[in-house]
Structure formats: C-alpha cells, structure tokens
Amino acid sequence: MKTLYVRDLLRGSKREGTAVTLLGWIKARRDMGQLVFLDICDSTGAIQVVVKGSQLEETEGQTTVAIKSHTEVISDTFTIAKTVPLESAVSVQGDIMHGPQGFEMHVDSIEIIGQANKQFSPRPRSNIDILDGNLADHLIRHRHLYLRNDKLAAILRFRHLLMGAIHGWFRGKGFVEITAPVLTPVPLYEDGTAMSLDVDDERVFLTQCVGFYLESAIHAFENVYNMGPSFRAEETRSKRHLMEYWHIKAELAWVDLDDLIAVVEDLISQMVAFCLDECDEIASILGKKICAHGLATPFPRISYVEAIERLHQLGIPFEFGTSLGSAEEQALSQQFVSPFWITGIPRKIEPFPYVIDKFDPRLTRTADLIATGGYGELLGVAEKIHDLSELDERMREKGKFGDPRYDWVRQLREFGCVPHGGFGMGLERFIRWLLDIPHVRDTIPFPRIFRRKIIP
C-alpha cells in the first residue's frame, strides 16, 4: 500500500539525504545528455527527479571506480529514464535533496510498473486547455484518460470538496439525508420529459426530481435533503443542461416562500465562503478566481411581472406565461451585481404541487435564483400544496387527476399534511458559476449529453 506521496516530499516530511521510494507516473522529461530530469506525479502533485549517467558519478571530485553491478544499475536506470514512455507508472528509489527550486529526488533506480505503450495526442497530463470547445469532442470520447489532466482533476477535486461542504451544511442545520429512489412510477412533469424503462412489464422512470419522496419524509423528520442523480429526456442543447446531472434537493416543514429564500441564501453564501477559504489553490490551477458574488446576501428580488417590464424596457419582446430563456436571464443579470430572485412564476409553466398565489391566481408561490455573469438559473424554490382540494384542482388543470400513479401523493394530504416547501439546484450549474466554466460538461466526471453516444 502506498504511504508516501509527492505532497509529503514537497512539504519536507523527509530530511535531506533520506532514501525514499515514490510511486507515481512520468508526467514530463527533460533530456540534458548525461542528466535526465523527470517530473513524477501522483494525485497530490509533481516532483522533479534527477537521473545521472554513470560517467557523472563522482566522489570528492574524482570519478568513482564502481563495481560492475553498480555501474550496470546506473546504466539501466539511466536508459529507462531516457526511454520510458511518458505517462508510464513507475517506482522510483532515491534520496531527497534540496535543489534550486525546492525539494527533488536524486534517483538510484527506476522500476516500470505499467508502461504506456500507446501514443496519444494530446497527452492527458500535458498542459492543454481542457475547456477549449475545439477539443471537447476528443476529450469527452476519451474521458477515461483525460481525468488525469491537472485542470480537469482540479475541477473534480473542487466538486468533491463542495459536495462534502454541502453535506456538512445540511447536517449542521439538522437536516436528515434521505436516499430517495432513482426508479419511480411518477414523473414530476409530463411522461415525455422523463426517461422511461420497463421493469416487470411496468413502465417506470428515472427520477427527474425526488421531491415527492422528500415530501413523505418531512412528516417524520421535518427537514430533509438529498443529493443524487436526476435525468431528463427532453432535449436541450445548451451550456447548462445535461441528460444526467446531480440534484441538490431539500424539503422543509412549516415554511413559506420567505423562509425558503432565507435558507437558500444562507446555503449559497456559506458555500461561496467555504470555496474562497478552502479551494482557492484549486481554482488557481485553472487560472480562475472563485466567484464571490454569492456573499452579497440578501439577494435582490423582482417579480416575474416586473421582469417582463424590464425586458420590454430593454427592447426585448416577451409574453406573460412563457419561461425565461438564457437570453432573457442574461439581459436581466446585467442589471445586478449579485444573484437575484424572480418571484411568482406563472402557474401555467409550473408543476401541479406548487401553491397558487392567493393575491394573483395566475402565479405560484415560487422563485428562481438567477446567477450573475449570464450563467442563468441556479435553482428554484417553491411552497408546496398541503390542502387536498387545492391539489386536486391543480392536478385537474395539469391532466393528472385520476391517474392512479399519484394516489400516494394525494394520500399524503389526508394524513396530517403540513405547510411545506423545498428547493432544488443542479450541482453542475453551481460549480460552473463558481469557477467560470463555459459548459457544464466539464464539471462532471463523465458527461451525458443529448445526441451523443454514451461512451465511455
């Protein structure tokens, strides 16, 4: 088992002159004749190792008269250093020394653990722009290799740390994690918008949203959350949509819209603060600065009706009852220096479980949070209907009343249902905004994109 990492050596965990064995990959080589410099990397960084030819072995200025076996070891090691293909996995033995640019290794022997036998261009660990749209097709088709790239690895490490922080925030606030099912008989929207499959002659769907299951759980735990995959079948070829993405969902009992907005603002601001404190070094690998706009809470609010008025003032035609698109959201975002809320989304375009605004029955008690910089909608919050008669009205309106698949959803309203609400945010959209990444495909290890063969 590996116990010594590059990071340990760079931090000076071993005294100068200490013999060590390092396991890693050859990232780069600089051949200077009788000196070869290799960059050996692992998951924590890269360190320079120095390999000398036999005629450079000296003791007190005099050429060493070495026994044959020692000379052969040096020769073999030097040959390996000059010829082993880049990206090969190796075991390197040598002494830690302090060189001109920090700690380095002076090598005694190199063992090839796994040789990189195929030529591949561009090399996965080379300094390429993994966000370059011209390389996107190649990088996605060979994602299993390009996960090794420093920049892509930095994004995925950022994702790992952010997910851990989100779990920590929820648990610190007393939320209980509910691991909701991926297979469900009930899509949130229309059947055609969900991916379906047959299980024992029954048509079921890959989840679009775990909200119905979290609604069940609040009557046991009051505040619950889930972070897991969601799937969409309706084709959307944009920079912020994937077929498969990770959904941060929460449901809370005894709340209204203002409560939900306050909870989300706390989550966003705390996560931005965490990333600024803990992930700045990761962002620097990408040449990026973490977006700090989410610290400026509370976020401004405008109504959906006001959003239309603002668009008309900008000369952008827009009809009531239509979903805001990327162009409209970008135009509105230029008027704000922080994320902003659009409240009161029309009932025509929202799912049936959301509460109708009693002051304007055209609208629902919902809000969407729009990011700065033209990154569009980050998340949505909604008050949920707890009265059965109101739910039935909305189900009739959406053509779902009488559908037996939703009987259990209705039944929740007959067993002590309470006012409640929730929010949902795509993890990839959040990462894209925080790191200023052009496309969500580069925020997930293996992207699933519309009209693209699923490989690897």
Image: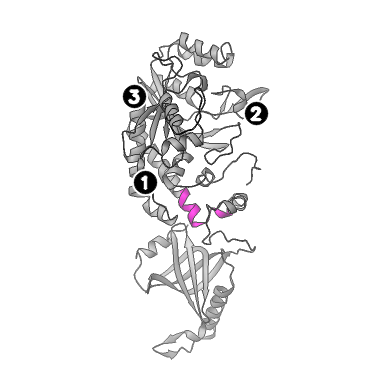
Residue 421 sits inside the magenta stretch: no
**Amino acid type indicated by mark 2:** Leu
74 versus 204 height, above or below: below
Residue 261 position in % (x across, y down)? 36, 28
Residue 155 sits inside the magenta stretch: yes
**Amino acid type indicated by mark 3:** Asp
For the residues labelled 2 and 1, the Cα–Cα distance comes to 39 Å
| Magenta stretch, residue numbers | 144-156
Which label's residue is closer to the chain start, 1 or 3? 3
**Residue bearing mark 1:** 275
223 versus 290 height, above or below: above
Nearer to me, 82 or 296: 296
**Residue bearing mark 2:** 197
Nearer to me, 397 or 49: 397
For the residues labelled 1 and 3, the Cα–Cα distance comes to 26 Å
Helix, strand or loop at label 3? It is: helix
Q: Are marks 1 and 3 in contact (CB under 8 Å)?
A: no
Q: What mark, if any, has residue 144 been given in the picture?
A: none
Quadrant housing residue 383:
top left
Nearer to me, 346 or 316: 316
Helix, strand or loop at label 2? It is: strand
Q: How was this image coloured?
A: one colour
Residue 239 position in % (x across, y down)? 53, 41
Q: Tell me which secondary structure the magenta stretch mostly adopts.
A: helix
125 versus 395 height, above or below: below
Report whether residue 131 is seen. yes
Q: Are marks 2 and 1 in contact (CB under 8 Å)?
A: no
Within-10-Å neighbours for mark 3: few <14, some 14–19, many 20+ = some
292 versus 94 height, above or below: above
Residue 370 position in % (x across, y down)? 42, 34
Q: What mark, if any, has residue 258 been given in the picture?
A: 3
